[in-house]
Image (spheres, coloured by chain):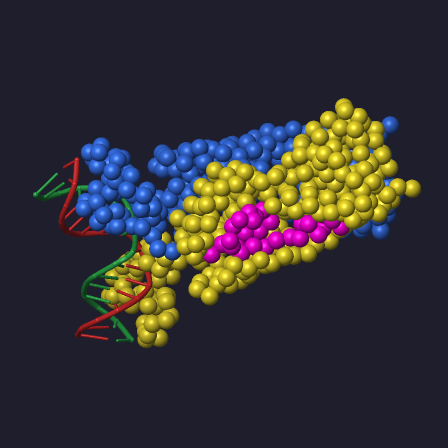
Chain colours: A yellow, B blue, C red, D green
DNA sequence: TTGTAGGCGTTATCAA
DNA sequence: TTGATAACGCCTACAA
């Protein structure tokens, strides 16, 4: 790849490089005609400023990095699309990176992005990420970062959150008022704040209705369909079948539901299900799964807006937290016991 | 953000910058002790070579750009993960970009990536992309690019393809041998080679069994669930219900199936379904959808390998095409009419 | 084995 | 209004 440089254009027109540069950055004085001439011949020659050099001098890239733990499940892609809409509008380009739930590649990704001088970062932590020192250092240096969804409570930074506690409480309450009293919670990974919050909501709903909970009501599960299947198989093997299952997210709920169905259990009569973080699947499976829907698109939009705010007001900026609301989409998997 | 530079380290140690540089690029002669000293103090000082400057001199970034039209449907994410595995192994970082099926932002993405000096590109075209001049220019300049899935036949470049024709033929043949004779094809977007190939397979299967086709057997549909729903609603309204539907991809098949189910049609007795490019959904919906499964992970792996080959042998490189095979996953939605 | 100095493609300051 | 030139942070002949 041979690049046409500013020098080539300068030579061709018998002008100084600085004049060419001026033509491309209209903040300087330059005669209208020369500017037009430069722009014209420049495009003819296929010239186009080298962003690498630009970044080197300006320490600024107009690129935003987004780091997500995975993007198989629809949730993160939707958030990204929301963020992109805002960012593109403001002339920023988005570089997306996925860490595959690995702390190591997450940090690697972040470093690459920072090295490439992205102007800011939108991050959702991997399930492995416990050590957040690197992020804190970055934040302390004044690097613009917004975290969303998977955050770490220790981190002093801007965050876009979902009210996991509240909606987990609602979702559990829904099951209870539908007549399900023996409900098992499939817990998410402990390292994530959202798992703790959802668990807390589950517990407080039981407190509210004065229903006792024992350790048997909690099963640690991942966030994959497979983990849900494994859990269900174990339940059936041990013959410990609850009235209902409230899962920390949709995939394990779906996995468990599949296994119970295969084993002849009727849903929701024999066992009811409620998931969390609605995936497209929820409405399509049989029976359709009741689930808490998060405003994915808006999460992206708000994260992007907050980040831009931070970039544009580097000094006056204080960490903020925005908490968004969702919806409980009630479907067949959790209707009333007749 | 203040960066520690090579000069800071040089000053601190009373050495020349070139010596510091050498310590970080072990291809030069340098005394072992000095090197160790440099590396030690450098990390202490938090120094770390500025990739921007490095790129500027070396014209090389060890970054690979991936451009996909969307990543809501699972297909592209899986491909990306496959590619990342290979690329990470070889020390490359991956920058992902999605064009949201828009030609304009696709080109914008590609340009940003090229400007950022990615060493190569893995691309799947958006459904809008008809004009491929920009890509051809890039290829002619010797820029390493591998296309996959959504390609343009005019483009003289390396490609990873799926044998759409063959598997569309198989899939259609499966429907025919199961007893379905009046099959409607939900066509994909015309601009894509894969749509044409799948249609061709559909047609040739009919030829093989000497079944006549009329224009009524073809309905242009998109690749969304919504488009499938709309199509089904129209069919029901016009009371033109075929024995079976072969869709160019899963989402329209799923959408159509949902509408037919809601309207009391029994699947597959009243109407059977076969999809293409298996999404996770296929096996989870009711009834499970027969679909052609593509080796998503391998597509990514092969694309990455081919790209690396191209990067490492810039001169001796000739455009190649690899065609991968799939599987027809036969499920309930298309079983034999009894 | 280490140092000097020019160059990568820009921008920005100072002169002209 | 334009030109010359020093940065930006690094690499790499070439010299020492």
Q: Position of residue B28 (x, y in %)?
A: 22, 36
Q: In the shown orientation, is residue B194 left or right of residue A60?
A: right
Kindly tell me whether residue B126 is visible in this rendering: no
| Near-viewer residue (B56 or A13) | B56
Q: Position of residue B233 (x, y in %)?
A: 81, 50
A220 is within the stretch colored magenta: no
Q: Quadrant of residue A254?
A: top right
A148 is within the stretch colored magenta: yes
| Near-viewer residue (B332 or A211) | A211
Range shown magenta = A144-171
Q: Residue at x 33, y 48 (%)?
A: B50
Whether residue A21 is situated above or below residue A225 in the rendered picture: below
Q: Position of residue A302 (x, y in %)?
A: 59, 59
Q: Residue at x 32, y 58 (%)?
A: A57
Q: Residue furthest right?
A: A338
Q: Residue at x 49, y 34 (%)?
A: B85
Q: Residue at x 44, y 46 (%)?
A: A134
Q: In the shown orientation, is residue A58 left or right of residue B101?
A: left
């Amino acid at each position: 790849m041979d690049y046409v440089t500013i020098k080539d254009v300068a030579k061709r027109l018998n002008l100084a490089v600085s004049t060419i540069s001026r033509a491309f950055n209209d903040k300087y004085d330059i005669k209208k005609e020369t500017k037009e001439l430069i722009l014209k011949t420049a495009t003819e020659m296929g010239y186009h400023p080298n962003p690498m050099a630009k970044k080197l001098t300006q320490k600024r890239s107009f690129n935003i990095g987004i780091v997500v733990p995975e993007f198989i499940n629809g949730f993160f892609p939707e958030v990204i699309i929301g963020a992109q809409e805002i960012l593109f509008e403001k002339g920023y380009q988005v570089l997306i990176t996925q860490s595959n739930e690995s702390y190591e590649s997450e940090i690697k990704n972040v470093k690459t992005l920072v090295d490439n001088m992205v102007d800011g970062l939108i991050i959702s932590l991997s399930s492995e990420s416990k050590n957040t020192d690197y992020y804190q250092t970055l934040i302390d240096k004044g690097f613009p970062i917004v975290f969303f969804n998977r955050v770490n409570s220790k981190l002093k930074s801007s965050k876009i959150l979902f009210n996991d506690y509240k909606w987990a409480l609602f979702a559990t309450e829904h099951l209870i008022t539908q007549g399900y009293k023996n409900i098992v919670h499939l817990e998410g990974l402990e390292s994530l704040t959202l798992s703790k919050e959802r668990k807390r909501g589950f517990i407080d709903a039981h407190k509210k209705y004065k229903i006792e909970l024992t350790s048997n009501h909690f099963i640690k599960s991942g966030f994959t369909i497979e983990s849900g299947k494994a859990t269900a198989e174990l339940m059936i093997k041990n013959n410990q079948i609850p009235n209902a299952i409230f899962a920390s997210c949709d995939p394990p709920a779906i996995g468990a539901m599949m296994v119970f169905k295969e084993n002849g259990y009727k849903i929701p009569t024999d066992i009811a299900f409620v998931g969390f973080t609605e995936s497209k699947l929820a409405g399509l499976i049989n029976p359709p799964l009741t689930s808490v829907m998060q405003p994915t698109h808006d999460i992206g939009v708000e994260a992007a807006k907050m980040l831009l705010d931070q970039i544009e007001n580097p000094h006056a900026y204080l960490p903020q937290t925005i908490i968004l609301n969702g919806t409980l989409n009630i479907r067949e998997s959790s209707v009333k016991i007749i």
